[in-house]
Image (cartoon, rainbow, N blue to C red):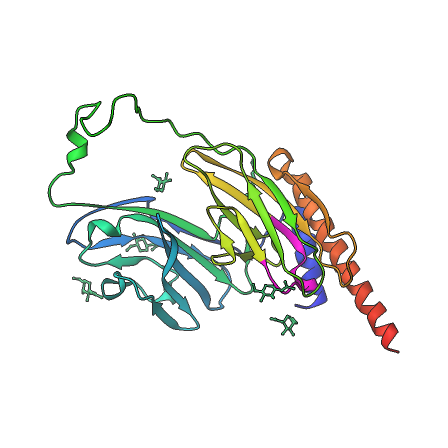
């Protein structure tokens, strides 16, 4: 990335301006299908970039998220799941419509599907490059539970449905010494929330990066960063979410070439104004870059 473009990105971040922001849209967040029929998960994205996107579709199950379909460099890859022979993209990717179909649906196809799009030269705002659709496949017989009197004979008395509670603002922490070549773990934990919140870590633009398992443990909220390099410095945001809501926290990771103070601060974003947050980010990014450049020059001088 050229210095000019970097400066422009920093300036845009500073002003809160975003050009060419990539966004994923979904036609609906709830799709219903009847067993045996075809289901379509409608999603598309907008971007001013002409570059090839990297598109993934994931399915979240109780056992965790797994990738089911992806598109990269002109190649559609369908992962080895029981969906494999039955699913695919509905349209050519260059149409920017990344809808998928699932033929001959089964009840176990039900779940939360998430698509995400990344384009190398496009700016991404957290959350905007993902689309989430819940698929519910109904058995051919009407679902029995819908007609049950409450309390039902299968639910021991005393157990009443618990209303969902949104997560409390999580705490972001760094474990380990952030020096080049080392490993560190970022942890994120919310004290409240019902059902237990799931966690997502993301590194903020301009070097946006979305993390996936196994580096990310969505249930525990940990993100393992291995073999640190100076380039991995940046602002990392963790979002804790459940069906009732989401809260986030952030941490500035500053990787050092020698072991000095590792982390500037953890900041709870939720309580900061958007502008303050943006300026904070931009300063960190600019500051980090300056630092990095200085340290590289120092290195060069030493060699002489
Ligand atoms: C993408 O395809 C889906 C499914 O056919 C459709 O519902 C949606 O309107 C399309 N989106 C656009 C922007 O054409
Ligand atoms: C899915 O069903 C459609 C319509 O019945 C059919 O045209 C298509 O070939 C099927 N695709 C797969 C992968 O089974
Ligand atoms: C970092 O983690 C990797 C993979 O988990 C491991 O192979 C390596 O030994 C670790 N390095 C250090 C310095 O702990
Ligand atoms: C760690 O990163 C450096 C430079 O990025 C690379 O040369 C080295 O092979 C990496 N080590 C491991 C264990 O991945
Ligand atoms: C989709 O499913 C997830 C997980 O079951 C749930 O937390 C979420 O609230 C659902 N979304 C909608 C819009 O119903
Ligand atoms: C963090 O939460 C605040 C609201 O509490 C929201 O305005 C902001 O967009 C969130 N930031 C991220 C990066 O998710």
> Dividing the image into four equal quarters, which quarter contains ligand 3?
bottom right
Query: Does residue 196 show up?
Result: yes
Q: Is residue 279 magenta?
A: no
Q: Is residue 147 above or below residue 256?
A: above
Q: Residue at x 44, y 52 (%)?
A: 130
Q: Is residue 267 above or below residue 227?
A: above
User: x%, y% of residue 20?
Assistant: 54, 57
Q: How many marks?
A: 0
Location of the C terminus by quadrant is bottom right
Location of the N terminus by quadrant is bottom right
Q: Residue at x 65, y 63 (%)?
A: 228
Q: Is residue 73 above or below residue 90?
A: below
User: x%, y% of residue 279?
Assistant: 70, 45
Residue 125 placement, left or right of 295:
left
User: x%, y% of residue 156?
Assistant: 24, 26
Q: Residue at x 83, y 73 (%)?
A: 300
- Please state which of residues 13 and 110 is positioned toward the viewer in this rendering: 110
User: x%, y% of residue 179?
Assistant: 72, 60
Q: Which residues are magenta?
A: 225-236
């Amino acid at each position: 990335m050229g210095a000019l473009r970097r400066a422009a990105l920093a300036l845009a971040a500073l002003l809160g301006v975003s050009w060419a922001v990539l966004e994923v849209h979904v036609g609906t967040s709830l799709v219903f299908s009847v067993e045996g029929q075809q289901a379509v998960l409608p999603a598309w994205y907008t971007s001013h970039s002409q570059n090839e996107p990297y598109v993934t579709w994931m399915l979240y199950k109780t056992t965790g998220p797994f990738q089911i379909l992806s598109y990269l460099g002109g190649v559609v890859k369908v992962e080895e799941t029981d969906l494999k022979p039955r699913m695919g993209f509905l349209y050519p990717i260059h149409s920017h419509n990344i809808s998928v179909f699932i033929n001959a649906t089964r009840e176990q196809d039900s779940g939360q599907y998430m698509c995400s799009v990344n384009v190398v030269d496009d700016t991404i705002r957290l959350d905007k490059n993902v689309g989430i659709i819940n698929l519910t496949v109904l058995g051919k017989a009407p679902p029995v539970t819908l007609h049950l009197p409450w309390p039902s004979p299968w639910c021991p008395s005393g157990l009443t449905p618990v209303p969902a509670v949104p997560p409390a603002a999580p705490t972001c922490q760094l474990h380990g010494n952030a020096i080049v070549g080392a490993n560190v773990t970022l942890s994120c934990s919310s004290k409240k929330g019902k059902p237990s919140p799931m966690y997502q870590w993301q590194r903020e633009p301009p070097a946006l990066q979305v993390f996936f398992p196994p580096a990310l443990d969505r249930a525990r909220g940990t993100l393992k960063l291995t073999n640190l390099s100076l380039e991995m410095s940046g602002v990392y945001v963790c979002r804790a979410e459940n069906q009732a809501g989401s809260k986030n926290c952030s941490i500035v990771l500053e990787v050092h070439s020698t072991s000095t103070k590792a982390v500037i601060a953890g900041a709870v974003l939720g309580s900061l104004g958007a502008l303050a947050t943006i300026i904070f980010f931009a300063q960190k990014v600019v500051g980090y870059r300056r630092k990095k450049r200085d340290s590289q020059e120092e290195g060069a001088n030493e060699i002489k």
